[in-house]
Image (spheres, grey):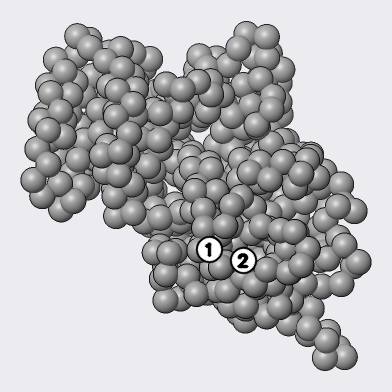
Amino acid sequence: MATTTHTVSNQAPPLLGHDVFGTDRVLGEAVERHLPPEVLGEARVGLTALGRAAGSAQAASWATQANENPPKLRTHDRYGHRVDEVGFHPAWHRLLGHAVGAGLTGAWDRPGGHVRRAAGFLVWTQAEAGHGCPLSMTHAAVPALRAEPEVAARWEPLLTSRVYEEGLRPPLRKAGVLLGMGMTEKQGGSDVRANTTRAEPLAEDGAYLLTGHKWFCSAPMSDGFLVLAQAPDGLTCFLLPRVLPDGSRNPFAIQRLKDKLGNRSNASAEVEFDGTWVRRIGEEGHGVRTIMGMVAATRLDCVTGSAALMRQAVAQAVHHTTHRSAFGGPLVDKPLMRNVLADLAVESEAATVLAMRLAAAYDDGGESESAFLRLAVPAAKYWVTKRCTPLVGEALECLGGNGYVEESGMPRLLREAPLNSLWEGSGNVQALDVLRVLRREPLALNAFLQEVGRARGADHRLDAAIRDMLTELADLAGIEARARRVVERIALVLQGSLLVRWAPPEVADAFCASRLGGDGGAAFGTLPHTLDLASVVARARPVES
């Protein structure tokens, strides 16, 4: 067949071979803002190396392979023995190994650890989001395990290790382990107090046997799991190792893997317990309180992961329109496209700035910052994860038909986008958690108001939004039915206050005008045309053209 019938032109080159961290001005500024000077240089070196790896053709190839070859369940060996193993493509292990080696499962005991890890998580998630699930849970398990210091002393060094060892062996014989989680059951979902899995105590102190099931068990290839079950004194948290110290397999029957909308590289499973040995973590009857430390940390990763998806989507959209010409010039210079891109960039920047502020609060660890997190994390998780899907969909549209094709990578981003809004409690659960904090913890509201008050007087639209928010909070009539409205306003006010303090004026102006001042529409691309939109778009460009 003749190959001279046409010449390929006006196609954007792939966005490869760039430093994902170094070209993200918003993230770089946040790292500099929140990290102590004594660790900033070392952190930059590590994040730059991770950023270059995330933007490489090699990482892109691993991501494609891991998603085109999803995990497979093997329930029995050739002789009929149950093995309940999940197999992954080698690309998955390379992605996971690189992430563990970069320290993305450990943050709790190093200076600026949460900011450094959050920045790395935001960078590396842009390479491939599915393997972020075991990274997140392994990192987040630490505060829950500390309810049993003896258990934490054995497991924590393995959870925070920079060595990735695939395969099932006794955990304490490995150089590094991964931890998953099993909370929800088919009859209860988010209502974990409806769980029916039973935990029968053994003679050995703290040891129990489980009988029951989990409807969603995340990362079933992990070395251990935190699970909830009904002990004699009520719902309790337990640590479940997949392999027992003598090398035998703990009963852990994987019934099937979930066939999910997105997150295809990662495994989620339905599992059954029948005489499964576990170790109690925390007191009997206090399972929810014990595991909430893990839940809060994974909720922050939902915010950070969504911010990563947003950033990658915006980077792809700006890159494509910079190199694509239409109607006589580059798409990026067309007024309407510029408005769309600027609006997307503002949303992405607000998500990143908020995620990094929350990570910094974890590093601070003081009473006020801890109180602030109890309100801000569920509010941020509610709002940022909900904004992710429409943003990715709009960014995909910026690529036109090219964006609807799998090879662009945009469909994978779009399928991934709704996950973080579902994981660790859907929107209603987050909204109700915010109401619970408002009712029971006045210190949390005070800490939040102190935070947003640092921007008082800087923008009249922000000041007005804070007053409106306080009016909403003062009216308790029908508050549960208004919970989403209240939480949305809390999140927007918090984002606005952070951008007014730390973002360039053109970004803060665009956010306050459209998100707080009512001068914007329901769709992206409806910013006031009088704003400096070109500067907003230029700030979001992933590479210099």
Relative height, residue 83 to residue 444 (above, below): below
- Residue 176 shows up from this direction: yes
The residue drawn where x is 52% and y is 58% is 285
The CA span between labels 2 and 1 is 33 Å
Drawn side of residue 388 relative to residue 92, left or right: left
Mark 1 crowdedness (10 Å alpha carbons): few <14, some 14-19, many ≥20: few
- Closest to the observer, 330 or 506: 506
* Residue at the image position 42 percent from the left and 69 percent from the top: 194
Residue closer to the observer: 325 or 472: 472
- Look at mark 1 in the image and give the residue it sits on: 233
Residue shown at 71%/78% (left/top)?
A: 275
Q: Position of residue 184 (x, y in %)?
A: 49, 66
Instruction: Nearest to the eye among marks 2 and 1: give it.
Output: 1
- Residue at left offset 22%, top offset 12%: 456
Mark 2 or mark 1, which has the lower sequence index? 1
Left or right of 298 on screen, residue 63:
right
Tell me the crowding category of disc 2: few under 14, some 14 to 19, or many 20 or more residues within 10 angstroms, Cα based: many
